[in-house]
Every structure is written in C-alpha cells, then in structure tokens.
Amino acid sequence: MEIIIKDDYQQMSRTAAEIVVEVLNTRPNAVFGMATGSTPLGLYQELVRLHKQEQLDFSRVTTFNLDEYVGLPVNHPQSYHYFMHEHFFKHVNIPAQNINIPSGTTSNYRAFCEWYEQRITECGGIDLQILGIGSDGHIAFNEPASSLSSRTRLKTLSKQTIDDNARFFDRREEVPVYAITMGVGTILDARKLILLASSKKKAKAIAQAVEGPVTSIVTASALQLHPDATVLVDQEAAGQLAMRDYYEFIYAAKPGAPRT
Ligand code: F6R
C-alpha cells in the first residue's frame, strides 16, 4: 500500500487527478469506478477543468459507481445519480451509454446486483477504483461486519453513516436506511485503487484502515490485501498514523528510486 500525505484538500485532489490522467493516458478506454460524497468533489472539479481547458478526453471511458441509496429516484437531489450528473458527467464527454450507476429503484434488487457484476466483467473489469472512507471505516456502503469477499448487494446503513449523511438531507429521518453497493470483493477486483480522505473526522478510520488489522469491522482495511492500493490523505486525515514520518520519507525518496 502506498500512503501519500498532501498539505491540504486541494493538493490531495490534484494528486488524485494526476493518477486518473496517468491511467487515461495509458488506456484511453479505461474503466473507472466512481465514488460520491464530499471527498471526491475536488477531484471531479479538477478533471472537469482538465477536460475544458486541456481537452482531457473521456469519450472512450466507461464508469461504474460504487453505490446508490434505495428508494431515491434518479432526479432526487440527494441521489447519487443526481450527484454524479451535477458534479461530473454533465461537464465531460463520457457517452451516456458508458455510465453505470446502481439502481435505487429497481423492482428486483437481487437480479439487478447480479447484472451489475456481470456488466463490470463484460467491460473488462475496473482499471481504477476511486474510493472515499466513512468515519466508521466503510468503503462504498460496506458497513462494519460486511464480508471481505462480498459482491454487489443490498445493505443496511449503519447508524453512524446515517448520522454522517444527515447533513445532506433536511431531516435525519429522510436519510435512506438501505443502499445498493458494490461489495468489498468487487472493489478488490479493480486493478488499481485510490482511497481519498481529508479532515480530522477521518483520522481514526484512516489509521485503522492502514495500520490496524485486516478486519470486516473496518472494511477499508481490506485495501491492505490489494497489490496496487494508494491511500491519499491531507495532513489532518493523516493525524493518527503512527508511521507517518516513514510514509513521508518513502514518498520523498520516490523520484530517485530505481525504476525497474
Ligand atoms: C460514496 C461512498 C462512501 C463515501 C464515504 C465518505 O459513493 O462510497 O463510502 O465515500 O461515506 O463520504 P464523504 O466523502 O461524504 O465523507
């Protein structure tokens, strides 16, 4: 696992965009796994800027979002369909038929989840999966005690996630209790993972994910099992990392490291 600590949110977002661009440059038809929430907003803004000002081309890209709330129609302002459209898709040139987001309103969740997994496989798998982390250590909506080999399925959100996400809704009772989410196993199948986190609120979860035991209680700790995972954080989110100096030393020495 590579740990990159940047001074602030903006620098973290810019570094994440550089990683996306690197993948896109080597693979113009890359398959990206997308996350929602506050954390990737800066990354999406930077990618939109690169598209508008530097002609970064997404015309051959395919995307798969991690999750969606159950029960929210696609045009609900808090649905992840709406979020992705507003903050990213409507500003770049990804063909509509290449965009995949779990359905929160299907009449058959089980069949939909199976189809979603199949569709990822048909598209050749995910080249780069972007992740955030919940304050309870979740990735996507894989709440504590989710199987580390889980696949796309329906999940009940934890009380902590409902509390955390209540900030986006008028009232706590409006936060959906269920979501459809890629599984930890689905995420681990991606060829490359980047997990972003900023602010003090994420410091404990980051320390547990990076330095704690691999456990289903902190599903982000499953990244330790992945051969190409990068954790990209700002100073505050790095605040509880015991080996922080070591990670900074490694990152600073990287440009001079032998190339092969
Ligand atoms: C969203 C997702 C979640 C969020 C996490 C952090 O697609 O998968 O795991 O990444 O809840 O959310 P923010 O960034 O709002 O703190």
Image (cartoon, rainbow, N blue to C red):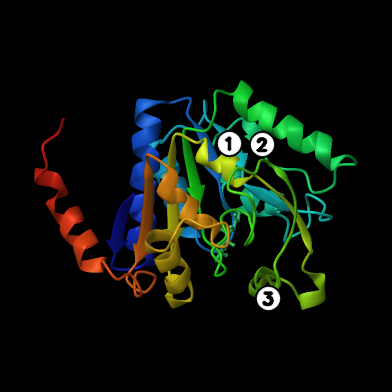
Pointer 3 local density, CA inside 10 Å: few below 14, some 14–19, many at least 20? few
Tell me whether circle 1 and circle 2 mark residues in contact (CB < 8 Å).
yes
Tell me whether circle 3 and circle 2 mark residues in contact (CB < 8 Å).
no
Q: Position of residue 200 (x, y in %)?
A: 43, 77
Residue in front for this viewpoint, 79 or 159: 159
Q: For the C terminus, which image quadrant?
A: top left
Residue designated by label 3: 163
Say which mark, if any, is on residue 100.
2
In the image, is residue 7 above or below residue 119?
below
The residue sitting at 58% across, 60% down in the picture is 37
The residue sitting at 14% across, 33% down in the picture is 259
Give SS at disc 3: helix
The residue sitting at 58% across, 36% down in the picture is 63
Q: Quadrant of ligand 1?
A: bottom right
Pointer 2 local density, CA inside 10 Å: few below 14, some 14–19, many at least 20? some
Q: Quadrant of residue 163?
A: bottom right
